Amino acid sequence: MALCYQYQLPVLPLDRPVPKHVLSRRGAISFSSSSSLFGCANPRVLSQTFTNSSNLWIPSSGWEERFLERRGAISYESSDQTALYIRMLGDVRVRSRAGFQPERRDSHPYVDFRLLHLSPESGELASARKIRRLLSFQRYFRSAHLFCGVTPLNSLSILDDNYNGQAMRMLEKDGNWNFDIFLFDRLTNGNSLVTLTFHLFKYHGLIEHFHLDSVKLRRFLVMVQEDYHRNNPYHNAVHAADVTQAMHCFLKETKLATSFSPWDVLLGLLAAMTHDMDHPGVNQPFLIKTNHYLASLYKNISVLENHHWRSAVCVLQESKLFSHLAVEEIYQMESQLGSLILATDITRQNEFLSQFRTHLDRSDLCLDEASHRHFMLQIALKCADISNPCRPWELSKQWSEKVTQEFFHQGDIEREHKLDISQLCDRRTETVANIQIGFITYVAKPLFVEWSRFSNTTLSQTMLGHLSLNNASWKGLLQEQSQGGDDTDFI
Ligand SMILES: Nc1ncnc2c1ncn2[C@@H]1O[C@@H]2COP(=O)(O)O[C@H]2[C@H]1O
């Protein structure tokens, strides 16, 4: 098929496996808009691809100029012998030989990786002069008070303070199921994921427990947030923040709070915030039928979830947030993170649901056992991921519209390119209400009924209550529509 839907370029597939001895270590390099590469962690692998010239790694051949026009990073890992991971920062466009509309991925908040990669060990601490050279006036103005801790005195900053104050007030109710993540995102100027997760790391005592460097932590969170596509109506950083807030609510439930270790809590929050990283806004069947390289890379199995996981690992390694932990602990973290993120593959829903039911029927869940705690983390993440129909109507309705908008956008592309239109993606035959009633009945309710068997609390009853009220509202809307008009106004 001539059609090729390609991102530029989270992963660069290699034409032949990288020899084992080259991949004996993992690492990352970064590159900037200047013509050179720097920040190499494993010279051996790079020497195959790049030539070394006075500590700068220059592409040896075939390296496309366009990669060097941007800032980004490449990381590689010994378990993946067929790919180098390339993260582009900001300005990433969907490219296609079939000529799809270019799409921008916004890069906010601004992070200059040339500054961030300067470490005290390298003896290259950022001088004020270096900073000025690298930043535009506006960025310098913003970063100046960041570095010096000075708040600029102008009328707009008073507004900022006001918004900040309101956002902080919202965080006092971080465990409230009515938490309005859309409002929080506006109050934090599009930084809901960074602000919420930093707060939750503090709330759960993870910074002290794991001796985390809070500058590295913030940098990591910014990188995670930036990897989400702002233009996706649904699979964006606000969804990740919403899932993280839901996970936090579950972690506070007595059964989990009394049995989970700081490690479990850390893994739960990490998985929630990273579980959809770099989501392209289309689903796996779309990637398969358009011969997307991610589909071949992951052999058509949990393609997106594998990519989210590898993207998360990439950012974890780049940020060096856990570089002080033992190598075995880092491996354990990466592999547990993988098993959690892979559990969010919705096509595996029945597998997890029947396992969960069996445990509940036998009453054999023992949360003293690490493997059972891990299973419950998988279930909690799955619940958090599809918890939007359990939110109050005003919030739930917005999510329903957003997810449908993303489905229909995919359907429009499929129609335009004469591909089979994926299930739920045809705006000519589907409606928001239809999709919601089906999703609540066959996907959300069965899972939340089991969750409330496991944890029969005010929260689980509240969630089931909203689920059934929302279902009734969608049924009412469907009836109204069948009596005249349709609901395409939603999208
Ligand atoms: N409100 C909703 N209505 C319909 N589908 C949903 C809704 N919320 C989540 N989903 C689907 O559930 C899936 C969970 O995994 P994904 O994030 O890959 O993609 C998600 C959507 O396809």
Image (tube, rainbow, N blue to C red):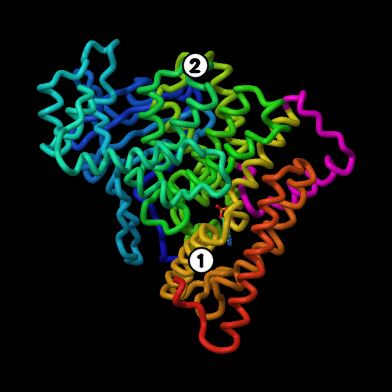
Q: Secondary structure at mark 2?
A: helix
Q: Amino acid at mark 1?
A: Thr
Up-down relation of residue 42 to residue 225 (above or below): above
> Looking at the image, which residue is at 30% across and 60% down?
102
- Residue 355 seen: no
Circle nearer the N terminus (2, 1) = 2
Bounds of the magenta segment: 342-370
Towards the viewer: 243 or 407 = 243
Task: Tell me if label 2 and label 1 are in contact, CB under 8 Å.
Answer: no
Q: Quick check: is the Cβ at mark 1 less than 8 Å away from ligand 1?
A: yes
**How many numbered marks does the figure carry?**
2
> Looking at the image, which residue is at 60% across and 46% down?
384
Q: Which residue is mark 1?
A: 404
Is residue 277 covered in magenta? no
Q: Give percent across and percent down for residue 124.
A: 21, 15
Direction from residue 384 to residue 219 in the image, left or right: left
- Residue 333 seen: yes
Q: Which residue is mark 2?
A: 208
Q: Give percent across and percent down for residue 18.
A: 46, 31
Q: Give percent across and percent down for residue 104.
A: 30, 54
Direction from residue 429 to residue 355 in the image, left or right: right
Q: Secondary structure at mark 1?
A: helix
Q: Amino acid at mark 2?
A: Glu
Specify the farthest residue to the bottom. Answer: 484
